[in-house]
Image (cartoon, coloured by chain):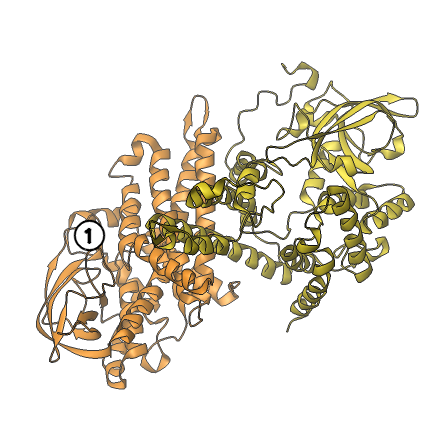
Chain colours: A yellow, B orange
Amino acid sequence: MSDLEAYRARAAAWLESMAPIYGRSARQGLSEADDLALGRRYQRAKFDAGYAGINWPTDLGGQGLGHIEKIAFDAEEMKHGFPNFYFGISLGMPVPVLMQFGTDRDFVKERVLKALKGEEIWCQLFSEPSGGSDLAALRTRAEVDGNGWKINGQKVWTSWAHYSDYGVIVVRTDPAVPKHKGLTYFWVDMKAPGVTVRPIKLAGGDSHVNEVFFDDVKIGDDQRMSPVGGGFAVAIATLMIERYVATDSAGFGPHLGHFIRLAKETHRDGRPAIEDGRIRAQIARNYAMRSGLDSINHRARLMMQAGMMPGPEGSLNKLVAVRSRQKLSELALDLQGSDGFAFDAHASQKEDWASSWINAPTGRIAGGSDETLLNTIAEKILGLPQDHRPDKGIPFNQIPA
Amino acid sequence: MTILYDEGQQAIATETRRALEARVSMEELLPLLENSGEYHEPFWTLAKEQGWTALTLPEAHGGLALGLIELGLVAHQAGRTMSGAPFLTSGFGAAKAIALYGSDAQKARWLPGLASGETIGAIAFAGGPDILPSRPDATFADGRLGGLSRGVTGGLKADVAIVLAADAAGTPALLLADLAPVRRTAVASFDNSRCIADLHFETTAAETLLIGTEARDAALHILALQAVVTAHEQTGGAEMLMEIARDYAVTRKAFGQPIGAFQSVKHRIAELYGLVELARANCIHAAAREGQADFLKAAAAARLSASEAYDTAARDCIQIHGGIGVTWDIGLHLHMRRARSLAIEQGSGLFWEDVLVDQLAEETA
């Protein structure tokens, strides 16, 4: 057994032992507040057991291991339905970027430790009503105010802002230069006067995303994490941090085995649906697609183990997997006919077809829409030209609204 | 699980590509389309010279004792330039059947020639819609084959064939037949260099390899082995078309900009990238699973994704070219034709979907 396999086996055993306390069954029927409290205890248990900050430096409370151990752990963790998603964004992007760019190292260390223990949560204040895919079109502004800055404007789609203690934010500090050049990166205290968080209820009934309003929110210049006007580069660095994450070829929906079981159990006019050619074709096509992604991801892990950079094909994961999950979920509901009407808004997207279906559009938009991902593949991998961009090179305040 | 190619394997890919690009050109392949029964001699000569015919065969019979991974790498490159003859895959299938199920005498008689490429092999399981029917059209009694094998790829030029036939009771038999005395009629096809023929068995002598369900299982295994090779070839073709589409989209201008700047075009090409990479990943995985319990599933997945990639790439690459794309001389129709002939050989998508779902349904409690 290789070191990595041994690590994975140890992690799997530990997670197995935690499942009855924090896993899927322990969470059933909990209110969100209780679930979050359970999540904080689970995060603390991970910290105590040495499974928090797996690939982070030891002097900041991490374990000093590699991406590959982190991915191995995450893949095992995914199986048990732990309440870990409250910390997914926090530990995924804002806190690592704080570690990288935060200037007051004592402050950084204190925040990182509290985040790793589940005591504090960070959010990422990027998207705005006027700019999601086009991040640099953002309008929230920071103006010089004494020795510090004053923020006014609005962010949107901010995951877990309503539970967050801190956030990282990109704002416009100079509207008189082209859009990418007038941005600056800060951290903010989410409890500061003038910060208002309003949850947004999503199509499936869930509300983990928010609108965040800033009204004359005063911050110090020591909260700045980029040069003035150099915020876009740090924003891109933030988005690059978790490039190689544990992925799921089921697109974070139900495993194909669930569909095959459903097709075997469902009878139409006395015939099991698994004998229906239309169903068979979809099973076969989905299997081929998912096994392709599994193979891509396995190869990426082998390359990381060998000290190589994985190929760019890993960028296909979300694009391909979520889109097909959406269609397969529709078909699963078709298959059940009127039995498919029954709906539980709190059912797991990984186990329930209706929940998977209604939340699938979010998956195709959040974290890079299908169209943005296709553009990235076309431009960065294949060398195709950028889209026509009429606002290129024009000072931000002269771009027609 | 999948693998990373080692240095030797990467060298095979590089060297194969260099050799093929020097010796095979679209200009030489185009005229073959209008001549039934001809193949591209320089391609086959190259295959023999380079030892591609010997790659997977045992050393004792003149082979190089490598595996599906190496042959897959060659097939991928052959798919890029388009192979000028089908014999690499058809001969591989025949040789594998003899190596796996033949007697020592049969191996000694046929494998050295198949390894050198002097002997051409073919697989004649069935014709028409069923690649593996429960009751094949060809018949077998008293050591003699009768009936017809329809649409056998490479059948026009093959010296030896592995045939699936039924005896009087309907029991399938896997047979080895010397094709020297067998009458063939060429099928005038949309992809003529495949040398497709109907084989007319008229009391043709044949030797038994296996009988009964074992014969059918063995036939499926041979198809799966060939399907993995073909999937690599399809992926190579799809990759080439994606590159051709990309190159055209960055140079051809319309409305004052390269057409690749229009999302309807650039997204189409990005989607091709996805199909090619999924097919490639499935191919690498399948080639590495030869001999394992899940090989059939891996082969089916590779086959399905590679057929989808090549067909879609052919469709979209021509579409992106506009009018020039449908001309004879630009040759994109060569890929379109090849995408279809490769999709049908060794069983179409319908067959492999069934094979795959049967496996999946069986293992799902």
SS for tag 1?
A: helix
Q: Quadrant of residue A136?
A: top right
Does residue A280 sit above or below A356 in this rendering? below
> Would residue A289 be visible to someone looking at this image?
yes
Which residue type carries mark 1? Asn
Q: Which residue is mark 1?
A: B192
Out of A359 and A232, give the one closest to the viewer.
Answer: A359
Badge 1: few (under 14), some or many (20 or more) residues near its Cα, within 10 Å? Answer: many
Out of A9 and A174, give the one closest to the viewer.
Answer: A9
Does residue A185 sit above or below B61 in this rendering? above
Out of B118 and B242, give the one closest to the viewer.
Answer: B242
B66 sits left or right of B208 in the view: right
Q: Quadrant of residue A141?
A: top right
Does residue B206 sit above or below A17 in this rendering? below
> Would residue A230 be visible to someone looking at this image?
no
Return the x and y of residue A61 as percentages of the image width and height.
Answer: 84, 55
Return the x and y of residue A154 as percentages of the image width and height.
Answer: 74, 24
A253 sits left or right of B80 in the view: right
Which residue is at a point 41% across and 64% down the rendered structure image? B362
Does residue B102 sit above or below A235 in this rendering? below
Which residue is at a point 46% across and 32% down the rendered structure image? B260
Out of A246 and A46, give the one closest to the viewer.
Answer: A46
Which residue is at a point 81% across and 36% down the rendered structure image? A225
